[in-house]
Image (cartoon, rainbow, N blue to C red):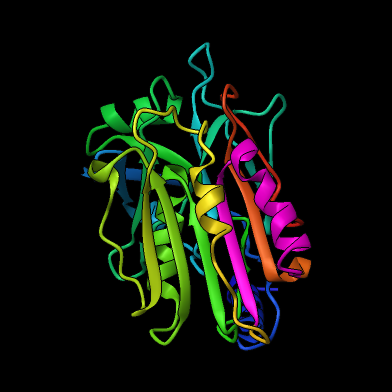
Amino acid sequence: MSRDAHRHRHTARIAEVRAGRRAEKVPYPIRIRRAEVVRTAPVGAGLVRVTLGGPGTAGFEAHSPDEHVKLLFPDAGGELRLPEPDGDLLRWPKPAPTSREYTVRRYDPDSGELDLDVALHDGGLGADWARAVRPGETVHVAGPPGGLIVPHSYDRYLLAGDLTALPALARWLEELPRTAVGWAFAEVADASEEIGLDAPDGVEVHWLHRGTAAPGSSDLLVRAVREIRVPAGERLYAWVAGEAGVIKPLRRWLRAELGLAKEDHDVTGYWKRGVADFDDEHDEHEH
């Protein structure tokens, strides 16, 4: 099957799921791309936007607000080991190369520009790279492996996350129908980490300031989310991402208290305190 035929097949499936009644993970062909850094810029006080481009980003696939790519880094000895194409997948060397995972914030098919917003955790490999990288430098990007496609037929949407989830949350709000209704909760240190959000008028946006508490140490987000009240008879879709331990109680709450079926919510640990390269599973979906 040709590459164009593959693309038609999965884009048709994406459209089918989007028009349906239940969310579903849809895989895309996974590529490894050699990209160039075009520019970097702060996004609030907590994120740095790294914009990639060049011939390697042509034909990039972007269909889901929380889809992700892996940036590949040289290992401790300075060697950069890359996966090899294997049909629609990649064949990864062993041991696995050093990598960090980031949400696709934006892809512009006309310019070929790909934005990745990197959270500035102190001492983080990716954060240090994002602070220091300069236009013209090369980076290798693997993915996305697919995305969770969520129909636009729900009555309400609940979106919640911390700073690391802010790029995906921002894209969620941009891509929801302008008629969408619901809530968005974002936990940040203070007002300096707030960013502009293009939310539908019917979505209430709540910024939660944890103050001097360390990232991933507060139950502020969990307590705020549990205050929502879903009108009887309405279908809710919930998306939650952040520090794995913090958001774990919301997995149980969404199922036990709100009674959401597994296809009606997605809870993902994007990171874990004290773990340098944490890789969680979506709540029944790959991350």
Q: Is residue 59 visible?
A: no
**Horizontal arrangement in the rendering, residue 44 relative to residue 244 (left or right):** left
Identify the residue at the far top of this view: 77
Image coordinates of residue 38 in percent, x first then y, are: 24, 46
Look at the image and give the residue range highlighted in magenta. Answer: 235-260
Between residue 37 and residue 124, name the one nearer to us: 124
Query: Quick check: 178 above or below 73?
Result: below
Query: Quick check: 80 above or below 195?
Result: above
**Horizontal arrangement in the rendering, residue 45 relative to residue 23 (left or right):** left
Residue 237 highlighted magenta (yes or no): yes
| Quarter of the image where the N terminus is located | bottom right
Q: Is residue 107 visible?
A: yes
Between residue 223 and residue 60, name the one nearer to us: 223
Residue at image point 63% right, 61% down: 29
Residue 35 highlighted magenta (yes or no): no
Residue at image point 38% right, 59% down: 206
Residue 19: quadrant of the picture: bottom right
**Horizontal arrangement in the rendering, residue 128 relative to residue 253 (left or right):** left
